[in-house]
Amino acid sequence: MSHPVSTPCRVEGHRARGLALALAAAAALGLGGCSGFSWNPLRWFDPAPTQVPAPLPPITGQAAVSTLWQASVGDARGAAFAPAVAAGSVFAAGGNGTVARFDERSGRELWRTDVASPLSGGVGSDGRLVVVGTTEGEVIALEAGGELRWRARVSSEVLAPPEVAGDLVVVRSADSRVFGLEARDGRRRWAYQRQTPSLAVRSPAGISVSSGFVFAGFPGGKLVALAQSNGGLRWEGTVSLPRGTTELERMSDVTGNPWVGDRVACAVAHQGRAACFDLANGVLLWAREMSSSVGLAVDGRAVYVSEDRGAVSALAASSGTSLWRQDKLQHRRLTAPLPLERELAVGDVEGYVHLLARDTGAFVGRLATDGSPIRSAPVPIAGGFLVQTSRGGLFAYGQK
């Protein structure tokens, strides 16, 4: 089911106009040359060189975490790849077109293939199908053994991992369109699109599939629930409303992947709020002023948000009230967090994984990888968790 609208003018599609708008807005805000604003139109919100990551505080005592295995899939080339874990395997990709499968427990490489296209988004897998996206808007699906099943086209570059949900592959393109493709052959079953602001954050904002619905956040602060079968709109909720007088000030885009539970869906917006909604009808349950460009995570007790300036906040899942805030990681460009059994894991721009106590936010551990940025949230694996660095390093850690 399609929802036709006028083609949005995005940063990705009209860079010259977007850069002019951003420069004008920056001048109006007095931002010319200030820290925190990058003149690269594809990296406007990356910290500028003058934003030095905060020094790491000392840690007394370390969480019981050990390295399970390490592997590599090649440099990400600026993309934010996230490994997929399914059927006892880890599926990972690199920017040069490499896709590989590893044993989840040992890290042993099971196969590696080259799809012969520069990749920008992935990986999605249910253990039977492995899906990645390219810089040219191509979606590539591989069999579980690494053989090519199909190639399909969407409207623009794929920045976020596709989702494999039964007989459907759900893909989000960089122009904020969502596509439902047949898992069998890649044919388009449906597409959802909406009008978006002229300026938007370039980020690997993804989608979540649960209970027959697809959940996606959009520029302008909206979270939607779509029917998985045909892309029809079930409900739309407002995470955040744009504010300000310039287009740069009014950017309020839902970022990261929406979190979906049994009864609640939650999301967070850049220059906006963290908010949770009733899963059945989209009614707002609570909202809290907060800005994040990477997303959030939820457990039975709390909503955890990695904020833009480097703080990690825990909010009560039932009300949004503050439980704790860890503010010692400023300018470290944190990933979205991953709740573990007793800790919270979050990666940073220097390749560190920080472990925070889930109940207090205190530092309880720190792990060094290869020194390159970690751009996607840690993912759970059997007995621990896994991170992928920008150099393509895969680091699996176990909890004792």
Image (tube, rainbow, N blue to C red):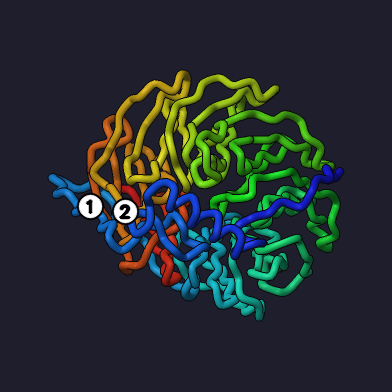
The percent position of residue 286, horizontal first and vertical second, equals 51, 21
Q: Which residue is mark 1?
A: 54
Q: Residue at x 34, y 39 (%)?
A: 312
The percent position of residue 168, horizontal first and vertical second, equals 77, 51
Q: Residue at x 71, y 74 (%)?
A: 147
Q: Which mark is residue 332?
A: 2
Element at label 1: loop
The reply to whether discs 1 and 2 touch (Cβ–Cβ < 8 Å) is yes
Residue 281 visible in the displayed image = yes
Element at label 2: loop
- Residue 88: image quadrant is bottom right
Residue 172 visible in the displayed image = no
Identify the mark nearer the N-term, 1 or 2.
Answer: 1
Q: Residue at x 70, y 22 (%)?
A: 281
Three-letter amino acid code of the residue under disc 1: Ala
Q: Is residue 170 left or right of residue 354?
A: right
Q: Residue at x 63, y 42 (%)?
A: 218
Distance CA(mark 1)–CA(mark 2): 7 Å
Where 140 falls versus 344 (above or below)? below
